[in-house]
Amino acid sequence: MSEAIRVPHRSVTGDRAWAVAAVTGIVIVVAGACSTLPGILQGPLRHDFGWSRGSIGLAVSVNMVLYGLTAPYAAALSDRFGVRRVVVAALVAIGAGAGLTTAMTAAWEFTLLWGFMVGAGTGALSMTLGAAVSDRWFARGKGLVTGLLSS
């Protein structure tokens, strides 16, 4: 049996690589902000909809669990289908989940939209995205870029 030949990724250092790292950093920060936004909105959600802290907390808990569970699978999907496709799918999930919350009326919808959709999307844009970008775009300084994207 012959072993498959693995072609190394194109790694470059330069302005384009740093631009990709900067955009990746912005995406990671925005995803993190989307993930934690219900904590800020808890008061308005309770006031406007009359929901309990428990029902809001359930959606936040589902979001956080999926944030952690989705990352390894997103990394595997990135290897198989490419980082760009996974990032676009994650951003669509976040945008759809967040956008549809403007039409929600029940707590279960909040759990479905913010808990599941936004949670899975933000999890796909977590630290695994930063590691993939630093590995693919930087021949030298991978540790520095990974450290910057994780902070």
Image: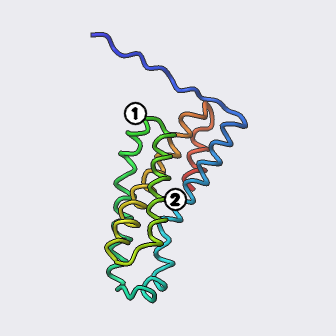
Residue corresponding to mark 1? 80
Residue sitting at the far right: 15
Where, quadrant-wise, is the C terminus in this rendering? bottom right
Q: Nearer the viewer, residue 68 or 97?
A: 97
Q: Nearer the viewer, residue 124 or 111?
A: 111
Question: How many residues crowd around disc 2 within 10 Å: few (fewer than 14), some, or many (20 or more)?
Answer: many
Residue corresponding to mark 2? 31
Residue 29, percent across and down?
57, 59
First reached walking from the N terminus: tag 2 or tag 1: 2
Q: Nearer the viewer, residue 63 or 135?
A: 63
The amino acid type of the residue labelled 1 equals Arg
Cα distance, mark 2 to mark 1?
Answer: 22 Å
- Residue 25 vertical position relative to residue 115 in the rendered view, above or below: above
Residue sitting at the far left: 1
The residue sitting at 58% across, 50% down in the picture is: 149
SS assignment at label 2: helix
Residue sitting at the far front: 103
Q: Going by the image, does 65 lie left or right of 34?
A: left
Residue 141, percent across and down?
62, 37
